[in-house]
Every structure is written in C-alpha cells, then in structure tokens.
Amino acid sequence: MSLTPADIHNTQFAKAPRGRRGYDENDVDVLLDEATGEMIRLLEENNVLRHRLGAGAPVDGREADRRAARAELSAATDALDRAHRACDRAEQEARLVRRQLDEVNQAAAAAATERNETSPERVLMMAQHTAEVYVREARDESQILLAEAGERAGRTLREARDAVAAIDRRSHDYQSAAAADLVTDRERVLRDIDKLTRFAADYHGALQRHLHRQGRLIDGTASQ
C-alpha cells in the first residue's frame, strides 16, 4: 500500500514508559510535519508538470508570429495579383497597337489603289515604318512591365516563404526545448517523490519496530 501525506500526518506513537528509552515526542512530530509538507509540495509540483506535459506547454509569441506570417503572405498574394493585372494590361495594350497597325496597313493598301504607283509605295513604306515603331515600343514596354512585375512578385513570395519557414523553425525549436525541460523536471520530481516515499516508508517501519520493541520491554519479554 502506498504511503500518502495523510498517513504520515496522522501517525500516532505511544509514549515510552518512564525509565525506558524512547524517541523525543517533539522531534518525532517535527520530522513528520516536515516529511508531510515536502511530500505535499512534490505531489503538487508533479501534478502541475503532468498537466502541462499532457496539455502541451504554451509557446510565447507563437500566435503573434503566425499572424505576422499570414499578413506577409497576404501582402505577397496581393502583390502577385497586381503583377498579373499589370501583365494583362500590357498584353491588352499590345493587342490594341497591333490592331491599330493592321488598320494603318489596310488604309495604306486602300490608298495605294487610288494613287499612282510611286505614291502608294511611299505611303505603304511610311505606314510600315510607323507600325514597326509602334510594335517595337509596345513590345519593349510590355517586356519591361512583365519583368518588373515578375521580379517584384518573386521577391515578395520568397521573403514571405522565408519568414514563414523561420517562424516554423523557431516554434519547433521552442516547443522541443520546452517539452525536453518538462520531461526533465517531471523525472526529477518523480525521483524526489520516490526518494521521499522510500524515506517515509523506512522511517515508518523503524518507528513501528521501535514501538513493537517498547511493547515487548513493557511486557518484560525483551532485555533492556
């Protein structure tokens, strides 16, 4: 049967008869009170550690880091959306320029049929030159916009991923360290409880043997 603080506290010892050797009553009471208090403290500490180990130790700042990571990821997503919209606008502008060039070519071809042979050729050359300029400028602007948008989006996404990975590593390291500390503290408390339990049991047994011997002395069945 396991020994509890109440068992130690409620232990009663008979007084040694006059003329017989025995333990001092006050010393016994003081020792029992100290043993009871220490066992209660260790049991309470063990319960707290057991509860924390079972529920999982809270990690300070982890929720704030997660919120910051979500905000960074949301900002990166918005930046990527803006980049996609900029690319779409650039493509639309390029298509518009292409249509305008086609219209210029058509107009030049129509004019060539109404004028003499030299004039249409000149008009067509001018139209083609203008069209080439429009196409080149539109293509260059579109490529610049696409490159800038892609670079911004990629950089923002990399920064967001790095931040999330760093937060996950910090949270994992903190949880691992906290769990290891809890296990170490729990093992220490369990060792202290086991040591105190053995001490109390040994002390209780010694007192019982002493009382038994005192009883035999009283009955005259044992030598002094």
Image: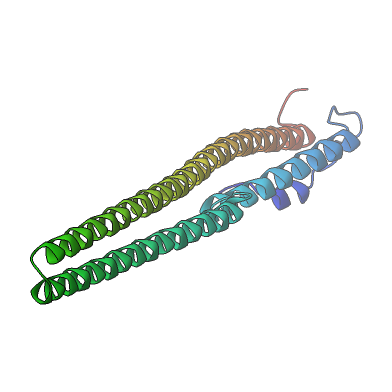
Q: What percent of the width, then of the height, locates residue 165?
A: 44, 44
Q: What percent of the width, then of the height, locates residue 83?
A: 40, 59
Compare residues 174 and 197 and report the one nearer the observer.
174
Tell me if 152 is positioned left or right of 95 in this view.
right
Above or below, 198 relative to 91: above
Compare residues 158 and 96 and report the one nearer the observer.
96
Q: What percent of the width, then of the height, locates residue 113?
A: 8, 75
Q: Quadrant of the C terminus?
A: top right
Tell me where residue 199 sits by quadrant: top right
Tell me if 7 is positioned left or right of 69 in this view.
right
Residue drawn at 67 percent across, 46 percent down: 45
Q: What percent of the width, then of the height, locates residue 164?
A: 47, 48
Tell me if 3 is positioned left or right of 145 in this view.
right
Tell me where residue 119 sits by quadrant: bottom left
Check the image and name the residue furthest to the top. 224
Above or below, 58 relative to 124: above
Residue drawn at 18 percent across, 74 percent down: 107
How many marks the image carries: the answer is 0
Compare residues 75 and 88 and report the one nearer the observer.
88
Above or below, 43 relative to 79: above
Residue drawn at 17 percent across, 70 percent down: 108
Residue drawn at 11 percent across, 77 percent down: 114
